[in-house]
Amino acid sequence: MTELGPFRVKPDGATLYSNPYAWNQVANLLFLESPAGVGYSYSNTTSDYEKSSDNNTAVDSYTFLLNWFERFPQYKNREFYIAGESYAGYYIPELTDTILKNNNSQTSFINLKGVMIGNGLINDETDSCGVVDYKWSHALMSDEDYANERCSASNSRHQTQSHTLPSRLISDGGEINPYNIYAPLCPSHPDPIWSNTLRSTFTDASIDGFDPCTPGYAQTYLNTHAVQSALHANVTGLPYPWEECSIPINLVYDRSTTTVVPIYQRMITSGLRILVFSGDVDSIVPVTSTRYSINVLKLSIEKEWYPWMDGDINVGGFSVIYKGLIFATVRGAGHEVPSYQPSRALTMAKFFLANKPLPS
């Protein structure tokens, strides 16, 4: 309801309007909340929250998919793609790895064709270095701080100084939205991301004009009793009202690894189609992080860096086609690409699903 779905919520927090850039124009969409405990999802066994991990999330998601395809067998042989952003940079490769390892019988077969990962984590070391370099190159960091924070993104770069993500460079008061460093803020709330206010400079529903209070509209809508009833949400099992990033109090999450580079290598070997895309004004997992991390794979280039077009005159971003992986930037997009550049995001999805390079 804030990115690629068929509906957005109006500023009144009570009514919907159609998203003309929804991805269901090019594919059937199935949204999965994971790990258990986020959104409307829950576990009947509360101790499960203390066992949450990358590995368990992959197994749970895979188990869900097998059961879903059994419940809806008419979709079982359709081409299947997995898409996500941010920490899904780990979720998707780990789920993909689980699917590929278990695709050995008709009962467990999933017709997985490819993955799309936007502004996703890949490799902690190079991801962290990319954040530092991005902030310095976009005037969010002083030369003195950069000298202290810079680190090694490859063997030929600086000596490692730090692999931390320096959060203090974005004001704690919220003057800059780190998820899109040039985006406006929701004016009546100090937190630029998780506001639940309905007050906004926008009075009408707008997709082409980015409304920073959109997450607040959706949060209000999804906490409406009539909406929860219509969605068959078991709200009695939830620890909190619906929140964009709700986390159960007793959730303990265990990261299984600090890199998914080996899984990328297996995905490439398997022949899956892979699109890694990056909104270029995100400072959380910036384009520099993604480029450094892709370079770790040492892939040969099949089509060199070129501008891709969204329409006849608008440059949507830039792309390079490697052997086994497509990388694309999305011009003017933040961390959640379809929120900031919905038309360009849809164009990218359309061409990837059609197995065509982005239009030049």
Image: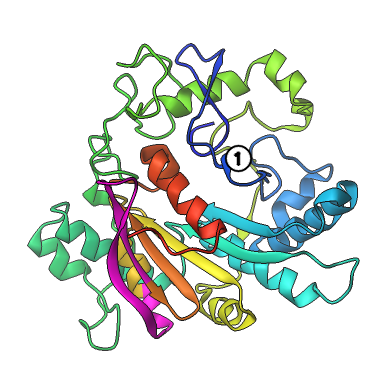
Q: Residues within 10 Å of mark 1 (few under 14, many from 20)?
A: some
At x 53%, y 37%, the residue is: 22
In this rendering, the answer to whether 220 lies above or below 308 is above
Residue 211 rendering spot, x and y as whole percentages:
36, 26
Residue 112 rendering spot, x and y as whole percentages:
70, 65
- Near-viewer residue (219 or 348): 348
Q: Which residue is mark 1?
A: 24
Kind of residue sitting beneath label 1 = Asn
At x 32%, y 19%, the residue is: 188
Q: Quadrant of residue 162?
A: bottom left
Residue 53 rendering spot, x and y as whole percentages:
66, 61
Q: Quadrant of residue 301?
A: bottom left
Q: Is residue 227 magenta?
A: no
The residue range painted magenta reads 293-320
Residue 339 rendering spot, x and y as whole percentages:
42, 38
In this rendering, the answer to whether 244 lies above or below 196 is below
In this rendering, the answer to whether 11 lies above or below 320 is above
- Near-viewer residue (194 or 100): 100
Mark 1 residue element: helix
